[in-house]
Amino acid sequence: MNKDEQNRWRESEKRSDSGMKLEHQYSAEVDTASLLRVMWRRKFAIAAATLITTVAATVYAFSATQWYRAETVLMPRESGPSGGLSGQLAQLGGLASIAGITLSQTSKQEPLGVLRSVGFAKRFVEQHDLETALSEQFDLGPALGADIPDQRIQRAVDRFRKSIFTTAEDKKTGLVTVAIYWKDPVVASNWANAIARQLNEEIRERALNESTRNIQFLQGELERTKVVSLQQAIARLVESEMQKLMLAQGTDEYAFRVIDDAQPPFKRARPKRAVLVLVAFLGGLFASALLAILIDPFKALLHEVNAG
């Protein structure tokens, strides 16, 4: 094949490609135009379906239970590695073997772990008698048997942790947010503040009990030992535990400082009416338009099946 023939062949290929592109473009335009004609032919049905969906969503948005979100912001108290008895023992070396205590560092994550535990939620539900309020709002169901007497309270605690009570920790600032969702804004704020108080009280009681036991143990060791250096070391430990004991007795905010008390919210958290109505409108419009497009092919398919 000479050069002229090659050029003619390339030009014919280009014209063929251009023709195919035009054909595809024309086919796409024809398909789009046919779809628009189908939707226009059924415009009243599409509008009616969209209107019904939007009205139903609007009615639900304005009739559904309004939930409010109240939150309190907490700051964990700093606790270094030498804050507890084990930290003091770590600094004083061999005295740990006398005390028989495993060395470990205290962590500010302990109060947060208690806050997020099932046991704390159960104690809060029981102490504030929330089972009745939760059973009025949610279906807790009857107890399945007398062998599980606290089954309803377990369901109440589970519902409380999943739908009512949430926590969030800001890793950068260390702030912890305790949030309560409830239909009464005043009750929601009261519960959020009560959670902070109960958590501080429980951690405070733990610290008091721990320091009391440690002081009793150390005083017993101080009476038994005759080594002067150990007596001095134990005396310093007793002094440290006495300081912890006085700190726990002297403050109510032992585990967390309350940075911002929960206040009754004025704006509802859900349902978000505008978002709900908009989603219903767009969803109804899309679904009805799709149904209008597919109804003719579906009828044709049924006709072929019946004819066959």
Image (cartoon, grey):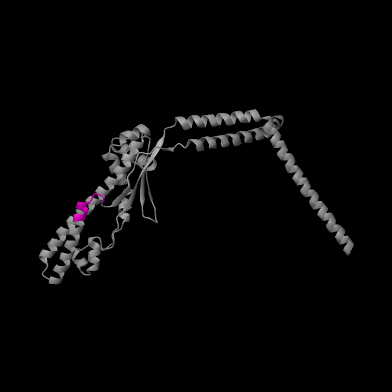
The quadrant of the image that shows the N terminus is bottom right
Side of 30 where 232 appears, left or right: left
What is the quadrant of residue 145 in the picture?
Answer: top left
* x and y, in percent, of residue 176 in the image: 35, 50
Which residue is at the front of the view, 257 or 306? 257
* x and y, in percent, of residue 128 in the image: 27, 38
Q: Looking at the image, which residue is at 15% across and 71% down?
A: 229
Secondary structure, magenta segment, majority class? helix
Residue 15's place in the image compared with 188, above or below, is below
Side of 2 where 183 appears, left or right: left
* x and y, in percent, of residue 58 in the image: 50, 31
Which residue is at the front of the view, 136 or 256? 256
Which residue is at the front of the view, 113 or 97? 113
Asked whether residue 293 appears in the rendered view, the answer is yes
Asked whether residue 1 appears in the rendered view, the answer is no
Q: Is residue 251 magenta?
A: yes
Residue 229's place in the image compared with 70, above or below, is below
Q: Which residues are magenta?
A: 246-253
The quadrant of the image that shows the C terminus is top right
Q: Is residue 100 magenta?
A: no
What is the quadrant of residue 213 in the picture?
Answer: bottom left
